[in-house]
């Protein structure tokens, strides 16, 4: 969840590292720091707060010089957010500096051992323990930094991505990963290190992604040396070309990344269709599914594992798979799945969903499912991510970089991929007739255009947001395919505005939530004509009879709900299974405008991180 950036080369490192840290701000953080080696001294500056606070502190001390630097944005796990607990941390001698994303679970035991040997600790972090453990190994066993890192990491239990620098060997960085992402940018006579490629894409298009359990020694006078942490086995570096560009990670004239990404959804869905959805030929072509179609056909059950917004996409997929492919589906939080001793059979298909492809709980659940013999299929957005490498097969969404912490286009592109898989499987099984299959393919092709239409309600949504921005609670109701959309709409509002919100199946309102309804509590109802429309009308009337305020998501031209509701937001009509791709759009915009009106940090909401790489 923390962000790490490093540079070694001939340029001044400060601007490269700081700019890189700003690119990683979307990951969420509470403090920031930088270490720069100027040829004589290792200067470390760190502070609670944002990268802007770090910049002010660096300039105050005039610590901007040096062609080697490591920087960090911290999301606190061990030790409260403050200047002392911020990274980088250094060893007792002051020779070693480290930045670390992850958790060292046995740090207390290691810390006590080091204390017994005379080490003193200034912070409450597990990271300071790790850097002193590396120094202890280096001194006692008289080995290189690289070897000391390998030995120390074999004693550490947990997850990490680290970069370590030694002033005694100033032309070298040592990096390693286990459970947290790490990319190495390969330039001309220079190298970059980061949690993802965004900090260095303007400098090089070539990158090496370390696999779990690998470490690398980056030396200006040698090629990258990669080895397995466990046994020291040499690994040949695989340098790949980056598929993103600088323009994709800039705001492009929008006030916030979240708004930009909401408006990118027509193109993102269209990109996810490209080469896969071919309605004129009446086919769906997906390599990851096509090459494993026998496994999908033989599956007696599909298990979907995910976290957060991806879990909501999985819930939508449950309805879609069961509707079209007629196969039982279970959807689990990855964090619960991995700990509850689930029953997994060899003829199960496990679909793991993650925007980043690095979600720690989802990664652990994948490994469990594989150990039990299941076929695991990944759905993620980031090419080369851990989940894309760990799964047996998969399909990328083509949302492009998603910087805003509150996921928007990742959600709709995940549903798009899952719907394509379900329809592909339905055709193969014969659970949908040719005419209906073709009609659904045609309707899917129209979705990007209809999403664009839904975005046209933005001004109307902004007016609704102005009326309800001061509400303390919201209730979101949906039925069938749109029940998960109600959950997702409530989550979006909670994430970025900090207003309490709950999503429920509309019929469940009578089983408790109706007690909360009064004239102060707005209820957002997804009331499209497809799917239990008459039942939803009854639910609206139940709210109105208790003086509740109704914000209704309706199809264009619906006059019945318009007369009942206090406010309506229109979306185009489509097939019931695809309505979540449209009804989620106004809920994203509603949460966005409320948060902006409340002066919240929309792209970086408090306490949240984009990629949850720790448990």
Image (cartoon, grey):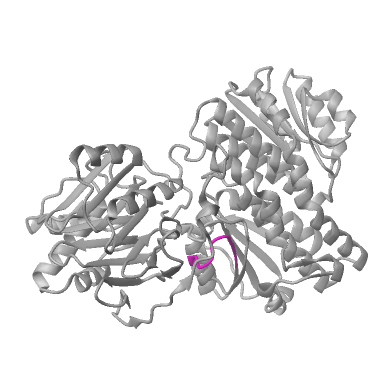
- Residue at x 13%, y 59% (from the top left corner): 95
Picture coordinates of residue 429, whole percent (x, y):
82, 72
Q: Between 64 and 76, which is closer to the camera in this rendering?
A: 64
Magenta stretch, residue numbers: 378-386
- Residue at x 76%, y 57% (from the top left corner): 320
Total marks shown come to 0
Q: Between 78 and 222, which is closer to the camera in this rendering?
A: 222
Residue 193 shows in the view: yes
**Residue 382 lies in magenta, yes or no?**
yes
Q: Is residue 423 left or right of residue 432?
A: left
Q: Residue furthest left?
A: 118
- Picture quadrant where residue 190 is located: bottom left
Q: Between 231 and 217, which is closer to the camera in this rendering?
A: 217
512, above or below 22, in the image:
above
Q: Is residue 445 left or right of residue 91?
A: right
Residue 579 shows in the view: no
- Residue at x 68%, y 40% (from the top left corner): 486
592, above or below 150, in the image:
above
Picture coordinates of residue 450, whole percent (x, y):
79, 47
Q: Between 372 and 477, which is closer to the camera in this rendering?
A: 477
Picture coordinates of residue 475, whole percent (x, y):
66, 31
- Picture quadrant where residue 548 is located: top right
- Residue at x 54%, y 43% (from the top left corner): 257
Q: Is residue 149 left or right of residue 266?
A: left
């Amino acid at each position: 969840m923390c962000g790490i950036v490093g540079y070694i080369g001939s340029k001044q490192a400060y601007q490269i590292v700081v700019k890189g840290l700003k690119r990683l701000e979307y990951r969420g953080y509470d403090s920031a720091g930088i270490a720069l080696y100027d040829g004589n001294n290792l200067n470390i500056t760190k502070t609670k707060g944002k990268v802007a606070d770090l910049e002010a502190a660096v300039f105050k001390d005039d610590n901007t010089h040096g062609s080697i630097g490591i920087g960090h944005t911290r999301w606190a796990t061990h030790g409260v957010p403050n200047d002392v607990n911020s990274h980088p941390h250094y060893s007792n001698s002051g020779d070693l500096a480290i930045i670390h994303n992850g958790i060292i679970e046995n740090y207390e035991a290691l810390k006590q051992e080091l204390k017994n040997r005379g080490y003193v600790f200034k912070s409450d972090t597990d990271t300071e323990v790790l850097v002193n453990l590396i120094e202890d190994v280096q001194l006692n066993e008289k080995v290189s930094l690289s070897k000391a890192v390998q030995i120390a990491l074999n004693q550490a239990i947990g997850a990490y991505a680290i970069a370590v620098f030694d002033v005694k060997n100033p032309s070298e960085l040592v990096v390693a990963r286990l459970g947290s992402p790490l990319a190495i940018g390969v330039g001309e006579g220079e190298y970059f290190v980061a949690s993802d490629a965004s900090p260095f894409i303007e400098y090089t298009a070539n990158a090496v992604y370390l696999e779990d359990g690998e470490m690398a020694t980056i030396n200006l006078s040698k090629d990258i040396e990669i080895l397995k942490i466990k046994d020291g086995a040499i690994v040949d570096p695989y340098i790949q070309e980056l598929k993103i560009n600088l323009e994709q990670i800039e705001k492009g004239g929008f006030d916030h990344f979240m708004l930009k990404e909401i408006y990118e959804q027509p193109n993102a869905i269209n990109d996810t269709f490209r080469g896969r959805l071919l309605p004129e030929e009446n086919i769906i072509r997906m390599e990851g599914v096509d090459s494993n179609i026998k496994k999908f056909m033989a599956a007696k059950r599909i298990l979907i594992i995910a976290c957060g917004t991806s879990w909501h996409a999985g819930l939508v997929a449950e309805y879609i798979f069961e509707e079209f492919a007629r196969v039982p589906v279970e959807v689990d939080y990855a964090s619960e799945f991995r700990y509850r001793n689930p029953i997994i059979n060899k003829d199960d298909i496990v679909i793991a969903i993650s925007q980043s492809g690095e979600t720690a709980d989802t990664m652990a659940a994948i490994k469990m499912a594989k150990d039990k013999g299941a076929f695991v299929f990944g759905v993620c957005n980031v090419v080369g991510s851990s989940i894309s490498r760990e799964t047996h097969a998969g399909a990328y969404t083509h949302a492009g970089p998603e910087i805003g912490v509150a996921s928007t286009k990742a959600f709709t592109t995940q549903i798009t991929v899952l719907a394509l898989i379900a329809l592909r499987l339905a055709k193969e099984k014969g659970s949908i007739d040719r005419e209906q299959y073709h009609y659904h393919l045609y309707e899917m092709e129209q979705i990007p255009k209809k999403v664009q239409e839904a975005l046209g309600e933005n001004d109307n949504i902004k007016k609704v947001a102005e009326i309800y921005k001061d509400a303390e609670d919201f209730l979101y109701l949906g039925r069938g395919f749109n029940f998960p959309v109600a959950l997702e709409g409530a989550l979006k509002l909670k994430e970025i505005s900090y207003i309490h919100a709950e999503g429920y199946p509309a019929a469940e309102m009578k089983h408790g939530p109706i007690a909360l309804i009064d004239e102060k509590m707005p209820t957002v109802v997804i009331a499209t004509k497809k799917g239990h429309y008459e039942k939803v009308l009854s639910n609206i009337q139940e709210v109105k009879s208790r003086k509740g305020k109704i914000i209704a998501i309706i199809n264009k031209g619906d006059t019945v709900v318009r007369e009942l509701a206090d406010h309506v937001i229109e979306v185009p009509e489509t097939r019931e299974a695809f309505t979540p791709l449209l009804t989620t759009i106004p809920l994203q915009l509603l949460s966005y405008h409320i948060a902006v009106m409340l002066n919240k940090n929309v792209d970086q909401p408090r306490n949240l991180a984009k990629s949850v790489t720790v448990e």
